[in-house]
Amino acid sequence: MSTPVLELRGIRVPGRQDPRLDHVDLRLHPGERVALLGASGAGKSTLLAVANGLLKPAAGTVLWEGVPLARSRRARRRQQARIGTLWQDLRLIEELTVQQNLNAARLAHWGWPRTLLNLLVPLESDACAAVLRRLDLDPSLLGAPVGALSGGQRQRVAIARLLRQEPVLLLADEPLASLDPRLAADLLQLLLALASPPRALLLSLHRPDLLAGFDRAIGLRRGRVLFDRAVADVDGDLLAELYGGSGA
Amino acid sequence: MRPAPPLLMLLPALVLLPVLALLPSQWHGGGGELIGRFLLAAVQPSLDPVVLRSIMGGLAVTLGMAFLGWSASLVLGLVLGAASSRTVWSTLSGHRWPAEALRRLLAIPRSVHELIWGLILLQLLGLQPVVAVLAIALPFGALVARVIADLLDTLPTHTLEALRGGGAPAPAALLTALGPPLLPGLLSYGGYRLECALRSATLLGVFGLGGLGTELRLTMQSLEFRELWSGLWLLLAVMLALETGVARLRRRWLMPSRLGLAGGGVGRRGREMVLALLALVPLGLVVARALGVEASALLRRPPLPALPPPDWAAVAALPWPALVAGTVVLTLVAACLAVGLAPLQWLLVAPWPAMKMLMRLGWALQRLWPPPLTALLLLFLLQPGLLTAALALGLHNLGILGRLLLESAVDSGAGRQQALLGAGSGPRQALLYGRLAPVANAYLAYGAYRADVMLRETVVVGLVGATGLGSQLMESLSSFAWDQILALVAVYALLTLLGEEISDRARHRLLEGKGQREREASQLNTSY
């Protein structure tokens, strides 16, 4: 089998009382779409933070495409550029235009001249227009300030930025929360469609009824993996145990 | 091709190019060894008990003068602020014009720097503590008055109308409807003013009005750098304690947690605020007694020397265009240095947390170190002149702007910065795009206001010469040519009012498109 896009081995992240993650193992292969389930506080966000390299676990190994986080700053930046995260609050830069935001995803590959020039004149318009078109957005939006967009447009611009980054690992932390049902369904289809090999998707989800398009589901409870199996094998009893009240 | 905000905030730093190009021509480097000794002394300040006692005494006097001047300015500002509020006048009498007239009148004391007030009062009253107190209280009072009046006039009036409609008498209705919402603004702004007062009291000391500033200048002139640093470190400790204390009170009173609100915290906070304000009165009396400030001393002023008849021809013969131009260029160069260097420095040190700590320490020293002393220090290396003055003024304000930049960026953009880092951008790129972009416009707006303050401040570096109106004023003051002083102060004030108008417009343009609330908030926090 090919090298996993992401591999976690024996991850432990201490918390105030109980560990936030404990002995977590996970493998994500190219093209896989995996949903992360669990009650709030189960450690979903922590796991995603470890997966995108922003949180260093106290114990355990994280491998991206088979290699740990590089020591040299330059190599590490190249590595992180291959990990794309869709944040729940989108984290777009309101003060800049859509195009400048899209180009922000290329900063990992850019030196200072282009970093500064991007703030003055539109750079790489064709590539930016292309990602907008892939998301059914009008390229005329490129010059618009992000602050002036509608909620739905902002979602799509955030995903367009992700595409512009050209990652192999797509992470998304509860991207569907706070969206109305139709918008949520559209967005989910969009994300699932993006996860074609070699790209893999790991998405935390608060609604088990939306599992349909995923290959696999991982249930987290109190920082531990409760189950990791094909979506077809996730049944009501398992979910009841996952979200169940005391169930010590 | 309009530069995006984060780029716009770096553009003023381009002034470094001409400054660095001109620096060699100004360099004499004669005091290089002295600068070395000065820097070395930073890590070995004098611990001699005699020195420390004298510095502590000086510090106590400076603190006392700052506190008294500040308290008086609050009282003055409250009274004059209410008296120049359109809402207050139209509620009480139905007319608005007295408010407008008083506003215009108050622009005059506001536009004259406290140092000019101090030096003129010194001539009139002789050397006594009350001079420094008044020099701080008068311009600060006029500033506070403007803020209060603006606050009062932007508060929503429907509570007031409801109370009036219910038959409440005008004064009672005003106090009930406008008092409580005014209090947080007053305290937030007042706290910031206290820090300014401490800086001003130190500065006045440098010009001989007593306290720590005088000690600093004397040790500097006698090249006792180790003693100088004892004073500086002590002042830094006090300044940082004050800044932290003010910030903590502000958080406690103005940004209550949601839990606090639910627990009926509003009433408790209100009582605390009122008590704190009332406690200032007895405290002020005690401090005044300790300092020997007496109101009656104002009457026992020394007889003025016989004034020579005015020589208006000589006044007209002053090189006015050159004086004004010098002042404006000095202001612009210093302002660009201060505004542009703060984000640039932050960007440069971004990858190293230890360097960032060092930068913060540098900024703290720069803002408490009075600009004329920086100018004296620079004279060890540079020729006297405009560039030296601009550097001294710019570095001082860099300390103030830098702190503001860090503070405003604390609660904005951390998530965006993290997102960019997570996508592989470098620490500097993430800072520029994620952290600085959201605050850029507000920062530049503050910079525009600060430039206006710096225009007023050019007088304090007048002693290095060739700085336009400031150095000419110093000269005229020392020869007590009152006709020249009068004309210079008038021109200075006019120039300042003009600058205020321009910086107001720039600010509004920069904050355009922001919500009304945001605009008001940023004006309240940063203006004046």
Image (tube, rainbow, N blue to C red):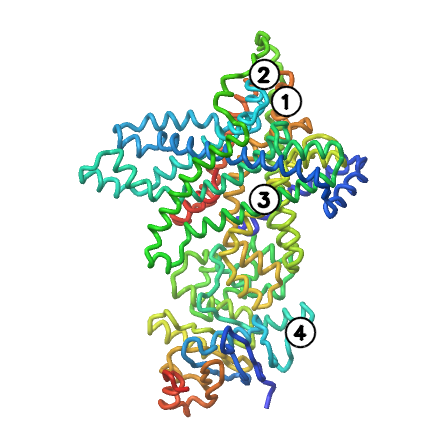
The amino acid marked with disc number 4 is: Ala
Mark seen at residue B31: none
Asked whether disc 2 touches disc 1, contact meaning CB atoms under 8 Å apart, the reply is: yes
Question: Viewer-proximal residue, B149 or B282?
Answer: B282
Q: Position of residue B114 (x, y in %)?
A: 54, 29
> Residue at position x 37%, y 57% from top?
B260
How many other residues sit within 10 Å of disc 4, few (<14), some (14-19) or many (≥20)? Answer: few
Name the chain letter of the residue that bears numbered label 2: B
The amino acid marked with disc number 2 is: Gln
Disc 1 with disc 4 on a shared chain: no
Question: Viewer-proximal residue, A71 or B60?
Answer: B60
> Residue at position x 55%, y 73% from top?
A52
Mark seen at residue B472: 1
Work out how far the residue at label 2 is from the one at label 4, CA to CA, in angstroms: 70 Å
Identify residue for label 3: B238
Q: Position of residue A175 (x, y in %)?
A: 43, 72
Identify residue for label 4: A70
Disc 2 with disc 1 on a shared chain: yes
Foreground mark, 2 or 4? 2
Question: Viewer-proximal residue, B446 or A156?
Answer: B446
- In primary-sequence order, the first of circles 3 and 1 is 3
Identify residue for label 2: B484
Foreground mark, 3 or 1? 3
Q: Would you say residue B26 is visible in this rendering?
A: no
